[in-house]
Image: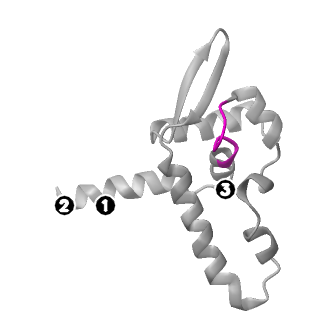
């Protein structure tokens, strides 16, 4: 039973361990979007986006709502955004002392990084 907790944790982290899925998470941080809106913003093929969204749905990171033919996606729990923001803070700390060219992007607000 004890190890099951770590297995669940690892499965959730695995769902979030892809840069495109993290971008999707950021796109949905303050809004609900349709598949076509996400596809347009990220310039992904329908098949590729569907695979990413399926992984996020399976891990219960996002929820869906059908409106006619459109499927709308939103973050399942606000703490996913908090966790992402905390990880960003760690990255800033790790790169702070290195004159790293990424610091400019790391210190931007997450909403400034997404293609809205």
Check if residue 42 falls in the magenta segment.
no
Image: magenta residue range: 26-32
> Which residue bears the numbered disc 3?
19
For the residues labelled 3 and 2, the Cα–Cα distance comes to 30 Å
First in sequence: mark 3 vs mark 2 = 2
* Residue 96 picture location, percent across and down: 69, 85
> Which residue bears the numbered disc 2?
2
Q: Quadrant of residue 49?
A: top right
Residue nearer the viewer, 102 or 47: 102
Q: Is residue 26 above or below residue 53?
A: below
Crowd around label 3: few <14 · some 14–19 · many ≥20 (10 Å): few
* Residue 62 picture location, percent across and down: 53, 37
Crowd around label 1: few <14 · some 14–19 · many ≥20 (10 Å): few
Image quarter hosting the C terminus: top right
Residue nearer the viewer, 104 or 7: 104
> Which residue bears the numbered disc 1?
6
Q: Which mark is residue 46?
A: none
The residue at the point 63 percent across, 44 percent down is 29
Mark yes or no: residue 78 visible: yes
Whether label 3 touches label 1, CB < 8 Å = no
* Residue 13 picture location, percent across and down: 47, 57
Secondary structure, mark 1, is helix
* Residue 81 picture location, percent across and down: 56, 52
Q: Is residue 76 left or right of residue 88?
A: left
Image quarter hosting the N terminus: bottom left
The residue at the point 65 percent across, 8 percent down is 68
First in sequence: mark 3 vs mark 1 = 1
């Amino acid at each position: 039973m004890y190890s099951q907790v770590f297995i669940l944790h690892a499965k959730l982290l695995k769902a979030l361990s892809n840069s495109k899925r993290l971008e999707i998470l950021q796109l949905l941080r303050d809004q609900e979007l349709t598949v076509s809106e996400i596809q347009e913003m990220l310039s992904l093929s329908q098949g590729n986006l569907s695979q990413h969204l399926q992984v996020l749905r399976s891990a219960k990171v996002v929820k869906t709502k059908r409106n006619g033919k459109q499927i709308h996606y939103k973050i399942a729990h606000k703490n996913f955004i908090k966790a992402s923001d905390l990880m960003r803070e760690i990255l800033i700390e790790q790169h702070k002392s290195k004159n790293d060219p990424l610091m400019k992007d790391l210190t931007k607000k997450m909403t400034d990084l997404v293609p809205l």
